[in-house]
Image: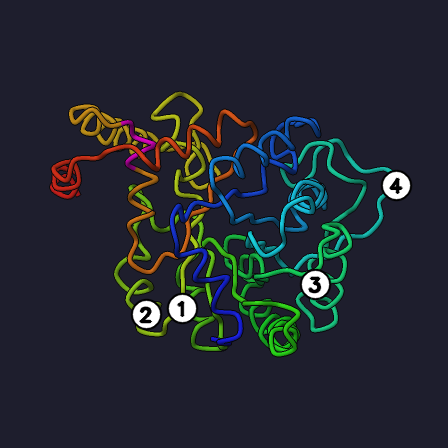
Amino acid sequence: MNPTWLPPLQRLAAPPRLGLGGAPLGNLYAPLDDDEAERTIEEAWRLGLRYFDTAPLYGHGLSEVRLGRALRRKPRGDFVLSTKVGRLLDADPAPPTERDGYVRGLPLAPRFDYSHDGALRSIEQSLERLALSRIDIAFIHDIDRHTHGPEQPARFREAMEGAYRALERLRSEGVLGAIGIGVNEWEVCSDALAAGGFDCLMLAGRYTLLDDSARRELVPLCRSRGVKLILAGVFNSGILASGATPGAHFHYRPAPEAVRARVARLASTCAAFGVALPAAALQFALACPAAAAVVVGARSAEEIAQAVAHAQATIPPALWDALAREG
């Protein structure tokens, strides 16, 4: 890890260790007006959150624009900002109403580009949209099987030979504070640690009450290497926040009946101890010994306030024992 940039990662590791995820600010699944987006960011700031994560994909640049507009009024040294590379945005004068799950984003079309020059251009574009002086952490985005299927090995090689070299150079020049990857699969994180010198990893949905598959191998590996984890997707696409309701999603798809039944048991066990299921889900991730921060998305001031309340809720140790007994 580049010692010049230890402070941003150390700030992530300090309380409250909760960050605001920018996907909902890019109109994920439903439109959000500019005023509500700004209120959400301002409420996160008021509640003490100082880590903000975004990506070009989120609203095809809209999330970056909205975050930059709010954060440029804050002291730059007081917050940590991350964005991602791997997709470039091209002008699209007639965009569809919905694309990639984002509704009424900016008139820009994303395309994958994990090349060296593509990563440099992506950082340049992000800085323009953010209108900020620097990016603290840059992640190579979605180089996993979930995104690329059978083409994943080729995309991974392209990223390591191209985007990684570009980010490594920008880190050495002080343009970036830290570099990592942002994916949905812990196995790809392990592959990345074997292939390059990453500072941190953003992992979605694989260190949760429903899926802790990263716990046995990746977490010890990160601790031994001094690499920080930033955990996202801790509600597993929503089911650990909403409970086993009809239409609940798990790993971006409608939850199977077996998963809904398991969530119902988890919720029942939590309720027996007077604890809300989302609070247990969030604090389980916050307790990960390799985690520097946990990122939660929110599309309103009320949602981020609720997340902070869950993070601060009192949970009796006996609940963790009971959940462990249930597997």
Q: As shown in the figure, which amino acid type bears the numbered disc 2?
A: Leu
Q: Earlier in the sequence, mark 4 or mark 3?
A: 4
Q: Considering depth in this image, is 53 or 190 the residue closer to the camera?
A: 53
Specify whether 239 is left or right of 266: right
Disc 3 to disc 1, C-alpha distance: 26 Å
Image height of 144 relative to 157, above or below: above
Q: Residues within 10 Å of mark 4 (few under 14, many from 20)?
A: few
Quickly name the residue at label 2: 221
Q: Residue at x 39, y 38 (%)?
A: 235
User: Who comes first in sequence, dot 2 or dot 1?
Assistant: 2
Residue 207 in the image: above or below residue 168: above
Predominant SS of the magenta segment: helix
Front label number (2 vs 4): 2
Q: Amino acid at mark 3?
A: Asp
Q: Which mark is residue 113?
A: 3
Mark-to-mark CA distance, 2 and 1: 8 Å
Label 4, on which residue? 93
**Residue at image mark 1:** 227
Q: Which residues are magenta?
A: 276-280
Cα distance between the residues tagged 2 and 3: 29 Å
Q: Select label 3 or label 1 by which is in front.
A: 1
Q: Amino acid at mark 4?
A: Pro
Mark 2 or 1, which is nearer the eye?
1
Q: Residue at the spot x=51%, y=47% of the render?
A: 50
Q: Are marks 2 and 1 in contact (CB under 8 Å)?
A: yes
The residue sitting at 14% across, 40% down in the picture is 317
